[in-house]
Image (spheres, rainbow, N blue to C red):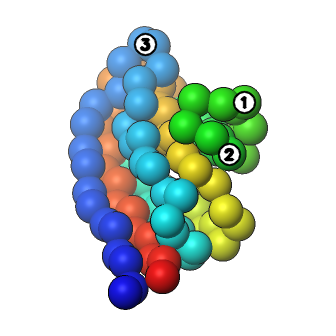
Amino acid sequence: MWKIDKGSASGTTTASYATALDWMVSELGKKTILLKNTDGSLSLTYKLTGYVTKDGIARELVAETTLLAGETAEFHYDRQWHRLTLQVIDGSGNATYTLDYEGQGA
């Protein structure tokens, strides 16, 4: 049976890192995440972490990176992970964001 897991989320950054996506992906092969800074003038900062087991060793997949107003970051993974977490924090202020994700597996 083919499995598809997808969704969307949105929010506003704060002065502390917040988890925008905590995605269990152990049954998925191909995974895509899009993060869009929907703010008109403020930047945000994000980082992406992977785990081979649910609460195991954190592996930084994307180091802390700035996303300017209106920009979109795109992530594609075919490699096996158990869990992916995307965290966001203020860049130049409380920026708004949306994200979409989809994964497919057998």
Instruction: Give the numbered dot on residue 90.
Output: none
Q: Residue at x 39, y 63 (%)?
A: 101
Q: Residue at x 34, y 68 (%)?
A: 5
Look at the numbered disc 1 and give the secondary structure of its residue. loop
Vertical order, 24 against 58 (above or below): below
Of residues 12 and 25, the one nearer the viewer is 25
**Do the residues under discs 2 and 1 have CB atoms within 8 angstroms?**
yes
Q: Quadrant of the N terminus?
A: bottom left
Q: Label 2 is placed on what type of residue?
A: Val
Residue at the far bottom: name it: 1
**Helix, strand or loop status at disc 3:** loop
**Residue ID at (34%, 61%):** 100
Q: Which mark is residue 57?
A: 1
Quick one: 56 or 99, which is closer to the camera? 56
Query: Dot 3 corresponds to which residue?
Result: 15
Q: Quadrant of residue 16?
A: top left
Distance (Cα) linking label 2 and label 3: 29 Å
Image location (x, y in percent) of residue 86: 50, 41
Mark 1–mark 3 Cα distance, whole angstroms, equals 25 Å
* Amino acid tagged 1: Ile
Density class for disc 1 (Cα within 10 Å; few <14, some 14-19, many ≥20) is few
Q: Name the secondary structure under disc 2.
A: loop
User: x, y (%) of residue 69?
Assistant: 43, 46
